[in-house]
Image (tube, rainbow, N blue to C red):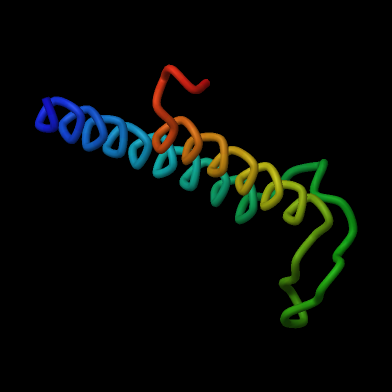
Amino acid sequence: MPDAVSRDLVRRALMGLAVVGVLSVLALAVVVGDHRFQGPVVLPLTWSHGLHLGDGLVGLAWLLCVGMVARLVVAPAASR
């Protein structure tokens, strides 16, 4: 029985890594891209680049989603 449990954990961990990988690529595309909802520059990095208000919101959303994926991977289905 421990083999089935460890295989299930590995399977869930791999699926979680795939979801976090896709989520990270999408978040990076939003942060690097230019869009009308980016907001004002909050932290200038160079004369032509900086962190916008929208970048912080994307970071918070990414962190929240990664936390939810981690919870789904680690917690057994019976405790959810």
* Figure check: 49 above or below 35: below
Residue 7 placement, left or right of 17: left
Residue 50 placement, left or right of 65: right
Residue 53: x and y, percent?
Answer: 83, 56
* Figure check: 25 above or below 52: above
Residue 9 placement: quadrant: top left
Q: Nearer the viewer, residue 43 or 80?
A: 80
* Figure check: 45 above or below 56: below
Residue 47 placement: quadrant: bottom right
Residue at image point 81% right, 42% down: 36
Residue at image point 80% right, 49% down: 38
Residue 51: x and y, percent?
Answer: 75, 66
Residue 43: x and y, percent?
Answer: 82, 73
Tell me the quarter of the image containing the N terminus.
top left
Q: Nearer the viewer, residue 68 or 7?
A: 7
Q: Residue pushed farthest top?
A: 78
Residue 67 placement, left or right of 44: left
Q: Nearer the viewer, residue 16 or 7?
A: 7
Residue at image point 55% right, 47% down: 29
Q: Residue pushed farthest front?
A: 1
Q: Residue pushed farthest right?
A: 40
* Figure check: 28 above or below 79: below
Residue 49: x and y, percent?
Answer: 72, 72
Residue at image point 37% right, 36% down: 16
Query: In this figure, what is the number of numbered marks?
Result: 0
